[in-house]
Image (cartoon, rainbow, N blue to C red):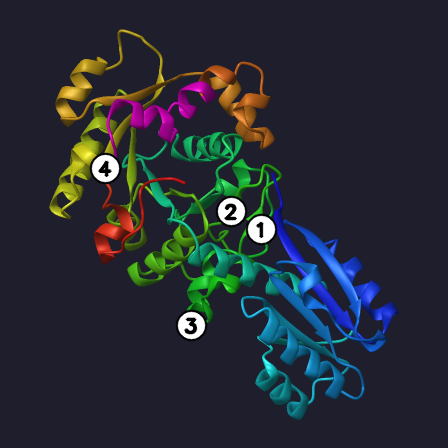
Amino acid sequence: MMDEALNVICLGGDPAVNRSVVALLGKLPGFAITTTAIDYQAGVVDLHRVGEAQLAIVILGPEPLPGLTVIEEVHRALPATQVVAVAPEERAETIVKAMRAGADEFLTLPLDATALLKVCVKLSALRGASTGPRGEVWVAHGPKGGVGVTTLVANLGFALRAAQRETALVDLDVHSGDLALFLNLASTYSLRDIATNYKRLDPVFLQGTMVRHRSGLSVLAAPPPTPGEPVLELTSEQTLAVLELLDATHQVTLVDTSAVPLESTQAALSCADRIFLVTELTLPALRACVRALDGLRHAGIELDRTVELVVNKYANRSWEVAPAEAAKTLGLPIRVMIPREDASVYTAVNSGLPLEEVRGGTTVQRAIASLLPEAANAEQGRPVLKGFRRLFGGSGAEGVR
């Protein structure tokens, strides 16, 4: 995983405080920060020599006036740079003056690493939302439980990261989601925190509810079952808000859904750029897929352009429904058939490891990786207006960056 590069200037009147801030910036996870420290008490501050900076941290002294003057100069010389004012104490008068001078944020000393990380995450989200095309939302849906949707999502996520695509995984199976378990992650927060604090939802709050996997995947976990807690019912509005925020800052947002047609599942399917309909070659699984396709068709989703049929656990045995017959029954071509490798899949799940790190798992992983955009686009060009663009009429999205 390549950390996001940020250029930061730190301006203060005390070199020792400057050094402590620089050291703290160097330890923030997820960012590769290059910091230029400037002692503004030492003379004229030449901001042009530091080049392009995304963030300026201006440390105010006990007498704030010199630092406020520096904030004005930064705001004038580097108008695109976010400015954080830092003061020894939180005084309303100082905060107002700092904001009027051009500061975007206000923090107090000693600086807290979490607060500083939130500033960087917010800056990252603003940069991602304002530059380049948006990403895509991919939804994996198995209308019959137990067909291996979570295994598919986890390992397709690994394939996306191996292809250097910034990827978020969302576990929308709010009743019994196990995506975090499959990835061997312990998440302090979950979708329940978003539902209960929905009015606070913004890129920074959302990022704070997610956990980072060692591969670089960002994961938004389903709520763990808690005795006494009511079952989470995530609304369509909440689901779409989360996915739209992730869509603006990630190349791919990959969603694991419940087999039950919850409101959140329907919302995710309605905005998906690609829907992976996952099935086994059994009559119950295929019958569930028929019902799901009827629902998607009723929702106005163009099946031939959006839905891709994924056959999982394919054993190539006579007792399975023939693949050609399954495709005929569902009226869709089979996009990929993932071989049945119980030993490697169970080992990966029980160990929290990618399939490619488990003996015998590379065959399954290669089949899953064939769903990446290069393989999909080789067969047929993707339509431009899809997903959120289809729902809200947005522009500028032409597939995965």
Between label 1 and label 4, give the one nearer the viewer: 4
Whole-number angstrom distance, CA of label 4 to CA of label 3: 32 Å
Left or right: 330 in relation to 247 = left
Of the two numbered discs 2 and 3 on the same chain, state the one appearing first in sequence: 3
Q: Cα distance, mark 1 to mark 4?
A: 32 Å
Left of 352 or right of it: where is 332?
left
Q: Is residue 72 left or right of residue 302?
A: right
| Residue furthest bottom as drawn | 93
Q: Residues within 10 Å of mark 4 (few under 14, many from 20)?
A: some
- In the rendered image, which residue does mark 4 sit on? 306
Earlier along the polypeptide chain: callout 1 or callout 4? 1
Would you say residue 300 sits in the magenta stretch? no
Q: Amino acid at mark 3?
A: Lys
Dot 1 lies on which element? loop
Residues in magenta?
365-382
Q: Is residue 262 visible?
A: no
Q: Which residue is mark 3?
A: 199
Q: Of the residues shown, which amino acid type is indicated by label 2?
A: Val
* x and y percentages locating residue 393 in the rendered image: 22, 56
